[in-house]
Image: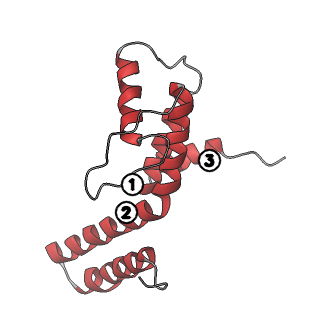
Amino acid sequence: MQDQPTPSEVLAAVARFLKDVVAAETTGHTSFNARVAANALEMMRRQLDLAPAAETAEQARLESLLGAPAAQPAAPARGARRRAATGDLTALNAELSRRLAAGELDLETRGLADHLWQTTLAKLAVDQPTYWGYRAALAERAPTKD
């Protein structure tokens, strides 16, 4: 394992090369595909950089909302990554979905709307950070300067 460059830095460099060199020096379908590939690499870089903290925060909100940590699966599948020691994020989301479908939780449930909003913003930060709606939502939630 190398210290430098980080995986995020490698992905950023390759994405820059695809956009600044390959896409710029080609035309048509090849140029388009280079831009698509660069965008995919940039999204994976954001996933590596942002997802761990976002998933930890999501898990904490779910555990608070649902009242207790979800049960751990008996054993993770080979090569599978455990999200955290207190519960599996997939199981917690499944339980949230079950409770919503059963009518046990709704938007009047304390913390639910905020959880859904925070989770959506975290996903947009990875997938579409330049999306105007995401930017507007961040600006709206930003603390005001007095």
Evaluate whether residue 129 shows in this view: no
Residue at 53%, 50% in the rendered image: 135
Q: Which badge, 2 or 3, is on the more N-terminal residue? A: 2
Kind of residue indicated by mark 2:
Met
Kind of element beneath mark 2? helix
Front residue of 24/83: it is 83
Q: Residue 41 has which mark?
A: none
Q: Which residue is mark 1?
A: 127
Q: Which residue is mark 2?
A: 43
Residue at 46%, 41% in the rendered image: 120
Q: Give the number of the mark in front: 2 or 3.
A: 2
Residue at 41%, 60% in the rendered image: 47
The percent position of residue 126, horizontal first and vertical second, equals: 43, 56
- Other residues around mark 1 within 10 Å, as few (<14) / some (14–19) / many (≥20): some
Q: Residue 139 has which mark?
A: 3
Mark 1 and mark 3: span between their CA atoms? 18 Å
Kind of residue indicated by mark 1:
Asp
Q: Badges 2 and 1: C-beta atoms under 8 Å apart? A: yes
Kind of residue indicated by mark 3:
Ala
Image side of residue 134 versus residue 89, left or right = right
Mark 2 and mark 3: span between their CA atoms? 22 Å
